[in-house]
Amino acid sequence: MLGEKSMQGKCDIPGSARIPVAILGFSSLILAASVWQGLDDFTRAGDVHAIAETAISLNIALMLFAWSQYREALRAWRAVGEASAEALVLETLDPHTGLLNRASFFDRAERLIGELRPGQSLGLLLIDLKRFGSINDAHGHKFGDELLRRVSESVLEVAPQAAICARLGGDEFALALPFDEDETGSLGTLAARVAERLQKPLEIAGVATGVRPAIGVASLEAARANISTLLGQADLAMNAGKKDQRCVTWFHPAMDQVARARSETESGLRAGIAKSEFVPFYQPQIEFATGRIVGFEMLARWKHPSGRLIGPDLFIPVAEEAGLISELSEALIRQALVDARDWDPAVMLSVNISPVQLRDTSFSARIADLLDEGRFPANRLDLEITRALVSPSPWTTLAQAIPRWRTCAPCLSMASRSTAVSASRSTGTRRVE
């Protein structure tokens, strides 16, 4: 089966078993010596029967002892062999799926690269299962393990004989295979078949379920083939496919440039937050009926060391992906609360927050601390969430978040083109407008 290694052991007699064999030979020598000694004694005493009986009894005893020791040594040898085979399986294969594990996949892939003929390339499919985490959480790890096993079976069903398959960890699988460089289309066809097969409905323990894969595809010709490089390229393609909601995505060199730019942005974000390079700007909110300014919306800007003023579209998505959005947002809110404290008391401060922050159960407590620190009235702070960002169930998300704000609730609003939802602290109730 693909993904498995055959294990063969040598059948040499172990050292512990050679000793009993030597005893068998030694007993034969004793028998011969006893006979000669018996003949000599016979000439002296004439009692050949007693001497022969003694020699034969001693030899039989030695042979029985040697045989029992040989059997014990053989049993021990077989037990060691079985344990070694089991250890090799555990070291080589993933215990849940029977596919190669990560370390063995790298080893086999490097050997596959060494076996490539001129005109051949190595192709790689990197497979990630969307929604696996939520399925695992909902139905338990045993259910999740069975789902992984079913996925591995599906991959093996469509994989060519020459392919090697592995579970790299979590819900990530890999399939590598050699192919002729003039048949690149066959790699794309294989990726499409894998995607189609994995999207078929499954039933586990009476529960209907299914997965949607994100497959990154990459290939390198024999002269440049390197499994680490290939895996990195397939990973970039797979992540791009996740963002674009595509099942199969091919690697393109431009993805490398995007990845480097993102890495530089993340590094700059970490350093910039520590150096207070992010500052709040304010956009007025005007009441149409009267033309009166009723509030200001805080806008984040990055005063980059290069001298540029960078807008949020370039760094907010990276901050969310890198887990920096809360730290960045709270640093900006802290400064905005100080700025807004001296405004007209009737003027609101509006701040956009990420859905990640809305779902964070400790976020409300941190906002309460910032309000106390800045001596700013909670009823003048409007935390705004864009409805589209918390779809497909924005109302449920907001309803789940509202109870956490009872002790320090500012106004919560959900903005869209035609509706707004607010949570008012002044009346002690939550209302929809």
Image (cartoon, grey):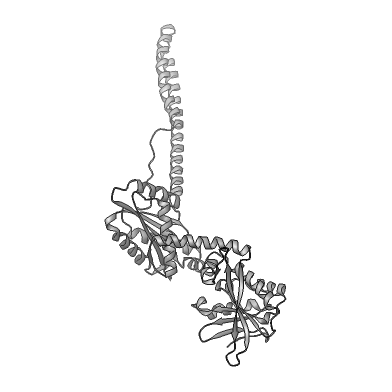
Query: Residue visible at 32% across and 64% down?
Result: 193
Residue 400, compared with residue 294, is above or below; it is: above
| Residue 115 appears in the rendering | yes
Q: Furthest residue to the bottom?
A: 289
Q: Quadrant of the C terminus?
A: bottom right
Residue closest to the eye, 4 or 14: 4
Horizontal placement of 320 versus 116: left or right? right
- The quarter holding residue 303 reads bottom right
- Residue 396 placed where, x, y %? 54, 79
Query: Residue visible at 38% across and 50% down?
Result: 109
- Residue 72 placed where, x, y %? 46, 35
| Residue 362 appears in the rendering | no
Horizontal placement of 144 versus 225: left or right? right
- Residue 93 placed where, x, y %? 43, 51
Residue closest to the eye, 277 or 411: 277
Q: How many numbered marks are there?
A: 0
- Residue 404 placed where, x, y %? 64, 76
Residue closest to the eye, 253 or 413: 253
Query: Residue visible at 56% across and 81% down?
Result: 414
Residue 47, compared with residue 403, is above or below; it is: above
Q: Furthest residue to the left?
A: 182
Query: Residue visible at 61% across and 64% down?
Result: 273
Horizontal placement of 245 versus 402: left or right? left
- The quarter holding residue 357 reads bottom right
- The quarter holding residue 280 reads bottom right
Q: Furthest residue to the top?
A: 44
Residue 123, compared with residue 46, is above or below; it is: below
